[in-house]
Amino acid sequence: MSKALNILNEIFGYPAFRGQQAEIVSHLTNGGDCLVLMPTGGGKSLCYQIPALLREGVAIIVSPLIALMQNQATALNEIGVRAAVLNSSLSTEEAGLVEQQLLAGDHDLLYVAPERLLTGRFLHLITRIPIALFAIDEAHCVSQWGHDFRPEYSQLSILHERFPTVPRIALTATADTDTRQEIIERLGLDKARVFISSFDRPNIRYHIIDKANSRSQLLAFILAEHRNDSGIVYCLSRKKVEETAAWLVSHGMRALAYHAGMSTQVRSMNQERFLREEGIIMVATIAFGMGIDKPDVRFVAHLDLPRSIESYYQETGRAGRDGQPANAWMVYGLSDVIQQRRMIEESEAHIKFKQVAARKLEAMLSLCETTTCRRAHIMNYFGETTEMAACGNCDVCLNPPQVWDATLEVQKALSCVYRTSQNFGAGHLIDILRGNLTERVKKWHHDKISTFGIGKDLSEKTWRAIFRQMIALGFLTTANDNYGALQLADACRPVLKGKQTVVLRQLTKSAHSSEKEKAHDMLPSSAAERYLWERLRTWRARTAQEHGVPAYVIFHDATLRELVRLCPQTEDELRQITGIGTRKLDKYGNHLIEILRGS
């Protein structure tokens, strides 16, 4: 481990291992297999990169996305590690050169897509070289019940069959108990050691608020908390992605769109801008994100409800990968619940898949409606027991929601559903309850039924919140049609019979927490520090442009902040700064000292 620590210090510029990193590195270096569950930004890559440099041969890294491969290889090359990629982005000549270099022993790590790895040509190629290890990144892709299923991943057990003596490490940030077991079974990792880090991401502040006007709410959030910051905004549909990006641009934001329906060229260009430039907001479907290794994303916003806690955790984890304060912000309303339920019911998937999807959606709704700490709720979902009662860094803990006995109102709503033959959606039912004599109400003579006007004392917004929570609690379900009709579920019987009390959350305020976000604490406080901060950022941007790499490949924001705070004046003092290894000290030390001395 002294050699491993030396590599960590000299090459990667970190003073010490974090959490279980040292144990994982030791186990893998000594030839053991392992499954590693570690949050995004927790340092998973180091767990195989360091053993790759300690063991003889080349490490083969299986990765699902071209962007991730290229970014990691570029960052490794910048610190003097010999890394390459082999994927469809290379020409035949370029791929041939990488293969020749591989045979010549010129690489320490090779990143490859699962489709390429499974070809007979590639498997034959690597039989001709010593292999240090196999690393299977984003291992949750192996699960057919997971949120990112990739069929090719299910065939990766071939690695153990063909190369039984080569150690393997499977890594993921997102896997519940069932998914973990499926990874172990499908990859043949029965004898592997399992390392599970905490699922807590203490630097991320979680907010989930009631949806009113989602775009206006989003803009207010960005202007209040993240002006000029990089962020990701997730939308469910391609149309909404394009409209939201255009709307943000019209309000002075630097926003780009990304979805699978765009041309490959435009997608690649927008992704490259997001990675290389600062202050870009990417509005995207879930087609964007997995493997995006940009450490300074300060917020992730959701304008639509994710389909599971796994998806939510994975997507929000793209914020604050550098360990600095970040926000996970979401607006959530009745339409989201109905839409997600309908998508499951209308799916042509196998019944078992629908059951799993419904169960995962129910867990996601429970997170949205919880009156206890969101962070503890997420950790419990992933099987991590915690004594945490209040984290102090989520909206529920900062502004505990009020609850009220809504039993009578829920009974009124359920009765209204029953008396309209379970054929109508929430909007029409609310009109009946509030006594709104609309044309549709008159057409169906619903002004003549007993529930007409019995809920006029509550606002439309309050009734929408009631219906949303009734669906979340399983009292109502959506019909398998195109109209969003609500129907009674078996769970509502005790409520209708007066045998069950129903306590609901009151509407949450759309305003932000009265406390300033921790993200504001990241900015240097004095004028002199702010001036030095801007000089360092300007130098980093110019250097990154000269090298053709994203700015964070030169130095993370966390390193710049430490430089501002400690203001080292000599090379020896620079060595003590996190993120400055020997290679970067040699390349950039003189430039940094010039700036820090005010030259």
Image (cartoon, helix red, strand yellow):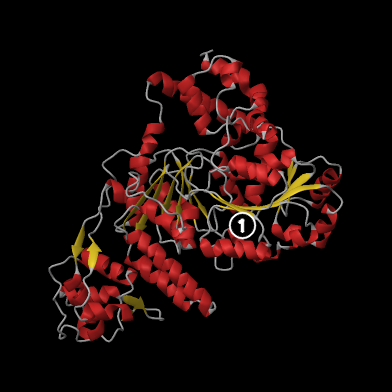
The quarter of the image holding the N terminus is top right
Q: Is residue 72 visible?
A: no
Tell me the residue at 61%/17% (across/down).
571
Q: Is residue 96 above or below residue 295?
A: below
**Side of 589 where 447 appears, left or right:** left
Q: What residue is rendered at 61% in x and 57% in y?
A: 139
> Can the viewer see residue 308?
yes
Q: Which residue is drawn at 32% across and 67% down?
A: 334
x and y percentages locating residue 323 in the rendered image: 48, 39
Toward the viewer: 67 or 17?
A: 17
Q: What residue type is labelled 1?
A: Ala
Say above or below: 201 vs 15.
below
The image shows a total of numbered marks equal to 1
Residue depicted at 47% across the width and 25% down the height: 533
- Whether residue 15 is situated above or below residue 302 in the rendered picture: above
Between residues 395 and 21, which one lies in front from this camera angle?
21
Q: Is residue 497 left or right of residue 393?
A: left
x%, y% of residue 307?
A: 45, 64
- Rendering coords of residue 162 (x, y %): 80, 60
Q: Name the residue under label 1.
A: 139
Label 1: which secondary element: helix
Q: Residues within 10 Å of mark 1 (few under 14, many from 20)?
A: many
